Image: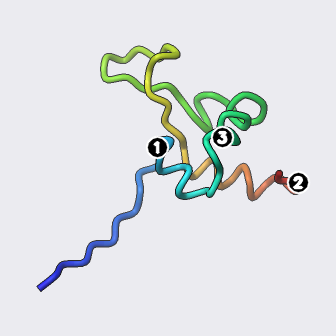
Amino acid sequence: MMNIYQVEPNKWVSNVLIEAITGLTERRIKEYRMYAWQEGIHFKHASPKGTNGTTAKLMYNRIEIDRFFDNNKRVS
């Protein structure tokens, strides 16, 4: 017998999952990060050591990103 699990992603997700959720490419996500999204709200650098430098892994807030697109009339 096969078990089926439905999993809802966390609030903060990796770039692989945010691409799958939004359908945006890696390049487009980078452009939003540089020009439209705010660090600490839409994305952040995360590290197990607590450092948040540019070498830390990028995590994305899927809820705030959805809200961003809901509130913007013009989406590229």
> What residue do we see at 52% from left, 16% from top?
54
The amino acid beneath tag 1 is: Trp
Q: As shown in the figure, which amino acid type bears the numbered disc 3?
A: Ile
Eyeballing the image, is 59 above or below 4? above
Residue at the image position 47 percent from the left and 46 percent from the top: 16
Q: Tell me how far mark 2 sits from mark 1, CA to CA.
A: 25 Å
**Residue assigned mark 1:** 12
Amino acid, disc 2: Arg
Tell me, yes or no, whether the two marked residues, 1 and 3, touch with CB atoms within 8 Å. no
Percent of width and height locating residue 67: 68, 53
Q: Helix or strand or loop: what does disc 2 sit on? A: loop
Question: Residue 61 occupies which quadrant of the picture?
Answer: top right
Quarter holding residue 41: top right
Q: Is residue 9 above or below residue 29?
A: below
Mark 2 neighbour density, 10 Å: few (under 14) some (14–19) many (20 or more): few
Q: Where 53 sits versus 57, above or below?
A: above
Which residue is rendered at x = 72% and y = 37% of the image? 32
Q: Reply above or below: 1 against 66.
A: below
Instruction: Specify whether 26 is left or right of 48.
Output: right
Q: Give SS at disc 3.
A: helix
Which numbered dot is residue 74? 2
Q: Earlier in the sequence, mark 2 or mark 1?
A: 1
Judging by the rendered image, the residue that carries numbered circle 3 is 29
Residue 27's image quarter? top right
Q: CA distance from mark 3 to mark 2?
A: 16 Å
State the CA–CA distance, disc 1 to disc 3. 15 Å
> If the image is split into quadrants, where does the N terminus sit?
bottom left
